[in-house]
Amino acid sequence: LCRTALNASATIGPLALPQPQTPSRAAGSFPGPILVIANHVRGFKWDIAIGLRCHFSLSRHLHCSCTRRFAFVTSLAGGRKYCNIVHMSKLPNTRALAPRRHEEILRRVVSEGSVSIAELAAYFDVSRETIRRDMKLLADRGQLDVVHGGATLFEATEPALVLRSGENAAAKAAIGRRAAELVKDGMVVFLDSGTTTLAVAHALSGPRDLTICTTGLAIALHMCRQPQVRVHMLGGEIDPAEEAAVGLDALEAIGRFRVDIAFLGGGGLSPDGEVTDFTRNGAEQRSRMIAMAGKAYFVLDSSKFGRLTPLRIPGFHQATGVIVDRPPPPTISEALERKGPRVIVAPA
Protein backbone atom coordinates (compact mmCIF):
# COMPACT_ATOMS: atom_id res chain seq x y z
CA LEU A 1 0.00 0.00 0.00
CA CYS A 2 2.79 2.45 0.86
CA ARG A 3 4.53 1.73 -2.45
CA THR A 4 1.24 2.25 -4.33
CA ALA A 5 0.63 5.54 -2.51
CA LEU A 6 4.12 6.81 -3.36
CA ASN A 7 3.72 5.83 -7.02
CA ALA A 8 0.34 7.53 -7.19
CA SER A 9 1.74 10.65 -5.56
CA ALA A 10 4.63 10.77 -8.04
CA THR A 11 2.23 10.34 -10.96
CA ILE A 12 -0.36 12.97 -10.14
CA GLY A 13 1.90 15.34 -8.29
CA PRO A 14 1.54 16.93 -4.89
CA LEU A 15 -1.92 17.79 -3.69
CA ALA A 16 -3.12 20.42 -1.31
CA LEU A 17 -4.96 18.25 1.20
CA PRO A 18 -7.06 19.57 4.05
CA GLN A 19 -5.34 19.50 7.41
CA PRO A 20 -6.58 16.74 9.66
CA GLN A 21 -8.68 17.90 12.58
CA THR A 22 -9.44 16.24 15.86
CA PRO A 23 -12.42 14.01 15.16
CA SER A 24 -15.57 14.32 17.18
CA ARG A 25 -16.35 11.22 19.21
CA ALA A 26 -20.01 11.51 18.35
CA ALA A 27 -19.61 12.39 14.71
CA GLY A 28 -18.91 8.90 13.39
CA SER A 29 -16.90 10.30 10.44
CA PHE A 30 -13.46 11.81 10.08
CA PRO A 31 -12.37 14.73 7.89
CA GLY A 32 -9.35 14.35 5.67
CA PRO A 33 -7.86 11.27 4.04
CA ILE A 34 -7.88 8.18 6.21
CA LEU A 35 -6.44 4.73 5.69
CA VAL A 36 -7.47 2.22 8.31
CA ILE A 37 -6.25 -1.29 8.31
CA ALA A 38 -7.76 -3.54 10.94
CA ASN A 39 -6.33 -6.99 11.21
CA HIS A 40 -7.20 -9.36 14.03
CA VAL A 41 -4.49 -11.90 14.78
CA ARG A 42 -4.76 -14.14 17.86
CA GLY A 43 -6.36 -11.57 20.10
CA PHE A 44 -4.29 -8.60 18.90
CA LYS A 45 -6.05 -5.73 17.17
CA TRP A 46 -3.91 -3.43 15.12
CA ASP A 47 -5.52 -0.16 14.05
CA ILE A 48 -3.36 1.94 11.76
CA ALA A 49 -4.87 5.31 10.94
CA ILE A 50 -3.21 7.55 8.42
CA GLY A 51 -3.99 11.21 8.66
CA LEU A 52 -5.04 11.32 12.34
CA ARG A 53 -3.90 10.29 15.79
CA CYS A 54 -4.51 6.60 16.39
CA HIS A 55 -4.20 3.99 19.09
CA PHE A 56 -2.52 0.63 18.95
CA SER A 57 -4.25 -1.78 21.34
CA LEU A 58 -2.06 -4.72 22.27
CA SER A 59 -3.17 -7.55 24.54
CA ARG A 60 -4.70 -6.26 27.77
CA HIS A 61 -5.07 -2.51 28.10
CA LEU A 62 -1.59 -1.69 26.80
CA HIS A 63 -1.91 1.49 24.75
CA CYS A 64 0.40 3.63 22.77
CA SER A 65 -0.39 6.32 20.22
CA CYS A 66 1.28 7.93 17.34
CA THR A 67 0.51 10.50 14.67
CA ARG A 68 1.08 9.70 11.04
CA ARG A 69 0.54 12.17 8.20
CA PHE A 70 0.35 10.37 4.91
CA ALA A 71 -2.06 10.55 2.05
CA PHE A 72 -3.33 7.80 -0.15
CA VAL A 73 -4.85 9.28 -3.30
CA THR A 74 -6.02 7.57 -6.43
CA SER A 75 -7.40 8.70 -9.76
CA LEU A 76 -10.61 7.25 -11.13
CA ALA A 77 -12.33 8.22 -14.44
CA GLY A 78 -10.29 11.40 -14.62
CA GLY A 79 -11.33 12.49 -11.17
CA ARG A 80 -9.45 12.45 -7.89
CA LYS A 81 -11.01 10.68 -4.95
CA TYR A 82 -9.91 9.74 -1.52
CA CYS A 83 -9.79 5.99 -0.91
CA ASN A 84 -10.60 4.60 2.51
CA ILE A 85 -9.73 1.00 3.22
CA VAL A 86 -11.86 0.22 6.21
CA HIS A 87 -11.29 -3.43 7.13
CA MET A 88 -9.21 -6.42 6.24
CA SER A 89 -10.28 -9.65 7.89
CA LYS A 90 -8.92 -13.16 8.23
CA LEU A 91 -10.39 -16.15 6.55
CA PRO A 92 -13.43 -17.62 8.27
CA ASN A 93 -12.60 -19.04 11.71
CA THR A 94 -12.04 -22.80 11.44
CA ARG A 95 -11.18 -23.45 15.09
CA ALA A 96 -12.99 -26.38 16.64
CA LEU A 97 -15.82 -25.65 19.03
CA ALA A 98 -15.46 -26.77 22.64
CA PRO A 99 -17.51 -30.02 22.35
CA ARG A 100 -15.38 -31.14 19.40
CA ARG A 101 -12.18 -30.35 21.31
CA HIS A 102 -13.41 -32.29 24.34
CA GLU A 103 -14.27 -35.31 22.20
CA GLU A 104 -10.86 -35.31 20.52
CA ILE A 105 -8.99 -34.82 23.82
CA LEU A 106 -10.77 -37.81 25.37
CA ARG A 107 -10.20 -39.93 22.26
CA ARG A 108 -6.47 -39.24 22.42
CA VAL A 109 -6.25 -39.88 26.15
CA VAL A 110 -7.96 -43.25 25.78
CA SER A 111 -5.86 -44.33 22.77
CA GLU A 112 -2.48 -42.91 23.85
CA GLY A 113 -2.75 -42.84 27.66
CA SER A 114 -1.74 -39.17 27.92
CA VAL A 115 -1.88 -35.93 25.94
CA SER A 116 0.22 -32.76 25.79
CA ILE A 117 -1.16 -29.23 26.13
CA ALA A 118 1.32 -27.90 23.55
CA GLU A 119 0.38 -30.53 20.95
CA LEU A 120 -3.35 -29.98 21.41
CA ALA A 121 -3.02 -26.20 21.23
CA ALA A 122 -1.18 -26.52 17.91
CA TYR A 123 -3.64 -29.09 16.57
CA PHE A 124 -6.73 -27.01 17.37
CA ASP A 125 -5.05 -23.64 16.66
CA VAL A 126 -6.07 -22.24 20.04
CA SER A 127 -4.15 -20.92 23.03
CA ARG A 128 -2.70 -23.20 25.69
CA GLU A 129 -4.94 -21.51 28.24
CA THR A 130 -7.99 -22.68 26.25
CA ILE A 131 -6.71 -26.27 26.36
CA ARG A 132 -6.06 -25.97 30.10
CA ARG A 133 -9.66 -24.85 30.63
CA ASP A 134 -10.89 -27.79 28.53
CA MET A 135 -8.81 -30.23 30.57
CA LYS A 136 -9.97 -28.77 33.88
CA LEU A 137 -13.59 -29.18 32.82
CA LEU A 138 -13.02 -32.81 31.81
CA ALA A 139 -11.10 -33.48 35.04
CA ASP A 140 -13.99 -32.04 37.08
CA ARG A 141 -16.23 -34.56 35.34
CA GLY A 142 -13.84 -37.38 36.32
CA GLN A 143 -12.96 -38.19 32.71
CA LEU A 144 -9.20 -37.53 32.94
CA ASP A 145 -6.54 -36.35 35.35
CA VAL A 146 -4.58 -33.14 34.81
CA VAL A 147 -0.80 -33.42 35.23
CA HIS A 148 2.08 -31.04 34.54
CA GLY A 149 2.06 -30.18 30.84
CA GLY A 150 -0.97 -32.25 29.89
CA ALA A 151 -3.46 -34.86 31.03
CA THR A 152 -3.63 -38.60 31.52
CA LEU A 153 -6.31 -41.25 31.74
CA PHE A 154 -7.85 -41.54 35.18
CA GLU A 155 -8.72 -45.07 36.25
CA ALA A 156 -10.24 -45.61 39.68
CA THR A 157 -10.46 -49.40 39.56
CA GLU A 158 -8.43 -52.18 37.99
CA PRO A 159 -10.00 -54.87 35.79
CA ALA A 160 -10.27 -58.36 37.32
CA LEU A 161 -7.28 -60.71 37.09
CA VAL A 162 -9.06 -63.02 34.65
CA LEU A 163 -9.66 -60.08 32.27
CA ARG A 164 -6.02 -58.95 32.44
CA SER A 165 -4.43 -62.37 32.01
CA GLY A 166 -4.38 -62.26 28.20
CA GLU A 167 -3.29 -58.63 27.79
CA ASN A 168 0.27 -57.99 26.50
CA ALA A 169 1.18 -61.63 27.14
CA ALA A 170 4.43 -61.48 25.11
CA ALA A 171 5.58 -58.32 26.88
CA LYS A 172 4.86 -59.81 30.30
CA ALA A 173 6.71 -63.01 29.38
CA ALA A 174 9.78 -60.97 28.40
CA ILE A 175 9.63 -59.08 31.71
CA GLY A 176 9.28 -62.39 33.56
CA ARG A 177 12.41 -63.81 31.92
CA ARG A 178 14.44 -60.69 32.74
CA ALA A 179 13.27 -60.77 36.35
CA ALA A 180 14.10 -64.47 36.70
CA GLU A 181 17.72 -63.72 35.74
CA LEU A 182 18.06 -61.76 38.99
CA VAL A 183 17.07 -64.77 41.16
CA LYS A 184 19.85 -67.03 42.49
CA ASP A 185 19.77 -70.46 44.11
CA GLY A 186 18.66 -70.49 47.74
CA MET A 187 16.96 -67.07 47.69
CA VAL A 188 13.77 -66.11 49.52
CA VAL A 189 11.57 -64.50 46.88
CA PHE A 190 8.40 -62.48 47.34
CA LEU A 191 6.03 -62.52 44.37
CA ASP A 192 3.22 -59.98 44.45
CA SER A 193 -0.17 -60.90 43.03
CA GLY A 194 -0.89 -59.99 39.43
CA THR A 195 -0.45 -61.18 35.85
CA THR A 196 3.09 -59.85 35.32
CA THR A 197 4.37 -61.41 38.56
CA LEU A 198 2.69 -64.66 37.45
CA ALA A 199 4.85 -64.43 34.31
CA VAL A 200 7.89 -64.12 36.62
CA ALA A 201 6.77 -67.30 38.42
CA HIS A 202 6.52 -69.19 35.12
CA ALA A 203 10.07 -68.08 34.23
CA LEU A 204 11.58 -69.38 37.50
CA SER A 205 12.62 -72.78 36.16
CA GLY A 206 16.40 -72.46 36.57
CA PRO A 207 17.15 -71.55 40.21
CA ARG A 208 16.79 -74.25 42.86
CA ASP A 209 16.14 -74.43 46.60
CA LEU A 210 13.91 -71.36 46.46
CA THR A 211 11.49 -70.13 49.10
CA ILE A 212 8.53 -68.36 47.56
CA CYS A 213 6.29 -66.04 49.56
CA THR A 214 3.17 -64.80 47.77
CA THR A 215 -0.31 -63.42 48.25
CA GLY A 216 -1.46 -64.64 44.81
CA LEU A 217 -3.44 -67.89 44.57
CA ALA A 218 -2.40 -68.64 40.98
CA ILE A 219 1.27 -68.05 41.78
CA ALA A 220 1.15 -70.28 44.88
CA LEU A 221 -0.58 -73.03 42.89
CA HIS A 222 1.99 -72.90 40.08
CA MET A 223 5.09 -72.71 42.28
CA CYS A 224 4.03 -75.52 44.63
CA ARG A 225 4.23 -77.87 41.64
CA GLN A 226 7.86 -76.99 40.92
CA PRO A 227 10.71 -79.17 42.25
CA GLN A 228 12.94 -77.88 45.07
CA VAL A 229 10.65 -74.95 45.84
CA ARG A 230 8.96 -74.19 49.17
CA VAL A 231 5.87 -72.00 49.04
CA HIS A 232 4.37 -69.83 51.76
CA MET A 233 0.89 -68.54 51.02
CA LEU A 234 0.50 -65.33 53.00
CA GLY A 235 -2.83 -65.36 54.80
CA GLY A 236 -5.67 -62.88 54.78
CA GLU A 237 -9.03 -62.28 53.20
CA ILE A 238 -9.19 -63.32 49.54
CA ASP A 239 -10.11 -60.59 47.06
CA PRO A 240 -12.22 -62.39 44.42
CA ALA A 241 -11.30 -59.96 41.62
CA GLU A 242 -7.55 -60.04 42.33
CA GLU A 243 -7.56 -63.74 43.46
CA ALA A 244 -5.13 -62.79 46.22
CA ALA A 245 -4.93 -62.33 49.98
CA VAL A 246 -5.38 -58.76 51.22
CA GLY A 247 -5.81 -56.91 54.49
CA LEU A 248 -4.11 -56.67 57.89
CA ASP A 249 -3.36 -60.41 58.15
CA ALA A 250 -1.41 -60.31 54.88
CA LEU A 251 0.53 -57.25 56.05
CA GLU A 252 1.46 -58.95 59.33
CA ALA A 253 2.52 -62.13 57.49
CA ILE A 254 4.91 -60.16 55.29
CA GLY A 255 6.80 -58.97 58.36
CA ARG A 256 7.63 -62.53 59.47
CA PHE A 257 9.94 -63.26 56.52
CA ARG A 258 13.46 -62.28 55.60
CA VAL A 259 13.17 -61.61 51.87
CA ASP A 260 16.14 -61.42 49.51
CA ILE A 261 14.32 -60.11 46.46
CA ALA A 262 10.75 -58.97 45.74
CA PHE A 263 8.88 -58.50 42.48
CA LEU A 264 5.95 -56.14 42.73
CA GLY A 265 3.10 -55.08 40.48
CA GLY A 266 1.64 -51.61 40.17
CA GLY A 267 -1.38 -49.83 38.79
CA GLY A 268 0.50 -47.37 36.61
CA LEU A 269 3.66 -45.42 35.93
CA SER A 270 2.58 -41.78 36.01
CA PRO A 271 3.93 -39.00 33.75
CA ASP A 272 5.75 -37.71 36.84
CA GLY A 273 7.72 -40.96 37.10
CA GLU A 274 5.85 -42.42 40.06
CA VAL A 275 4.45 -45.93 40.45
CA THR A 276 0.87 -45.71 41.72
CA ASP A 277 -1.85 -48.14 42.78
CA PHE A 278 -5.60 -48.70 42.69
CA THR A 279 -6.29 -49.66 46.32
CA ARG A 280 -4.99 -48.75 49.74
CA ASN A 281 -4.48 -52.43 50.58
CA GLY A 282 -2.31 -52.93 47.50
CA ALA A 283 -0.31 -49.75 48.10
CA GLU A 284 0.38 -50.65 51.76
CA GLN A 285 1.39 -54.24 50.95
CA ARG A 286 3.81 -53.12 48.25
CA SER A 287 5.23 -50.43 50.49
CA ARG A 288 5.81 -53.02 53.23
CA MET A 289 7.58 -55.39 50.82
CA ILE A 290 9.89 -52.65 49.56
CA ALA A 291 10.90 -51.94 53.16
CA MET A 292 11.39 -55.63 54.06
CA ALA A 293 13.19 -56.95 50.96
CA GLY A 294 16.90 -56.74 50.29
CA LYS A 295 16.07 -55.64 46.73
CA ALA A 296 12.67 -54.80 45.28
CA TYR A 297 11.70 -54.47 41.63
CA PHE A 298 8.46 -53.31 40.07
CA VAL A 299 7.44 -55.28 36.96
CA LEU A 300 5.32 -53.14 34.62
CA ASP A 301 4.44 -53.66 30.98
CA SER A 302 4.20 -50.70 28.62
CA SER A 303 0.41 -50.41 28.92
CA LYS A 304 1.04 -48.85 32.36
CA PHE A 305 3.09 -45.95 30.94
CA GLY A 306 1.40 -42.59 31.55
CA ARG A 307 -1.44 -44.18 33.54
CA LEU A 308 -2.35 -42.44 36.77
CA THR A 309 -4.20 -44.39 39.45
CA PRO A 310 -5.61 -42.94 42.68
CA LEU A 311 -3.08 -43.98 45.33
CA ARG A 312 0.62 -43.43 45.86
CA ILE A 313 2.82 -46.28 47.09
CA PRO A 314 4.70 -44.97 50.15
CA GLY A 315 8.46 -45.35 49.77
CA PHE A 316 8.26 -46.57 46.18
CA HIS A 317 11.45 -44.58 45.43
CA GLN A 318 13.40 -47.04 47.62
CA ALA A 319 12.84 -49.80 45.06
CA THR A 320 15.96 -50.91 43.19
CA GLY A 321 14.42 -50.72 39.73
CA VAL A 322 11.46 -51.00 37.39
CA ILE A 323 11.57 -53.82 34.81
CA VAL A 324 9.70 -52.97 31.59
CA ASP A 325 9.25 -54.50 28.15
CA ARG A 326 10.26 -51.33 26.27
CA PRO A 327 11.71 -47.96 27.25
CA PRO A 328 9.17 -45.49 28.67
CA PRO A 329 8.96 -42.01 27.11
CA PRO A 330 12.12 -40.01 27.98
CA THR A 331 10.29 -37.63 30.31
CA ILE A 332 8.93 -40.54 32.37
CA SER A 333 12.29 -42.37 32.44
CA GLU A 334 14.16 -39.26 33.56
CA ALA A 335 11.59 -38.43 36.23
CA LEU A 336 11.63 -42.02 37.53
CA GLU A 337 15.41 -42.25 37.76
CA ARG A 338 15.59 -38.87 39.50
CA LYS A 339 13.40 -40.38 42.21
CA GLY A 340 15.69 -43.40 42.60
CA PRO A 341 14.64 -46.62 40.80
CA ARG A 342 16.50 -47.37 37.58
CA VAL A 343 14.77 -48.51 34.41
CA ILE A 344 15.60 -52.05 33.24
CA VAL A 345 14.39 -52.91 29.74
CA ALA A 346 13.73 -56.60 29.10
CA PRO A 347 14.94 -57.93 25.72
CA ALA A 348 12.13 -59.12 23.47
Image (spheres, grey):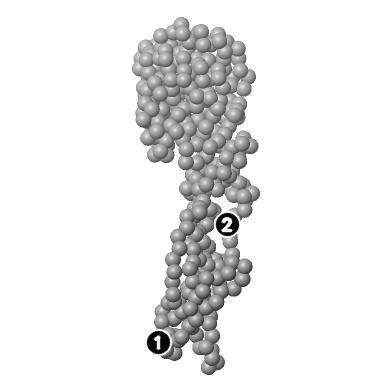
Mark 2 or mark 1, whichever is nearer to me: 1
**Residue depicted at 50% across the width and 54% down the height:** 61
Q: Position of residue 325 (x, y in %)?
A: 43, 34
**Residue depicted at 44% across the width and 8% down the height:** 257
Can residue 185 be seen in this snapshot? yes
Q: Position of residue 240 (x, y in %)?
A: 63, 19
- Which amino acid lies under the numbered mark 2 shown in the image of this protein? Arg
Q: Earlier in the sequence, mark 2 or mark 1?
A: 1
- Which amino acid lies under the numbered mark 1 shown in the image of this protein? Ala
Q: Measured along the vertical axis of the image, is residue 94 above or below residue 107? A: below
Disc 2 crowd, CA 10 A, few/some/many (<14, 14-19, 20+): few
Secondary-structure class at tag 2? loop
Secondary-structure class at tag 1? helix
The image quarter containing residue 27 is bottom right
**Residue depicted at 50% across the width and 85% down the height:** 74
- Circle 1 is placed at which residue position? 10
Q: CA distance from mark 2 to mark 1?
A: 44 Å
| In-front residue for pair 278/135 | 135
Q: Position of residue 127 (x, y in %)?
A: 51, 51
- Circle 2 is placed at which residue position? 95
Disc 1 crowd, CA 10 A, few/some/many (<14, 14-19, 20+): few
**Residue depicted at 50% across the width and 53% down the height:** 60
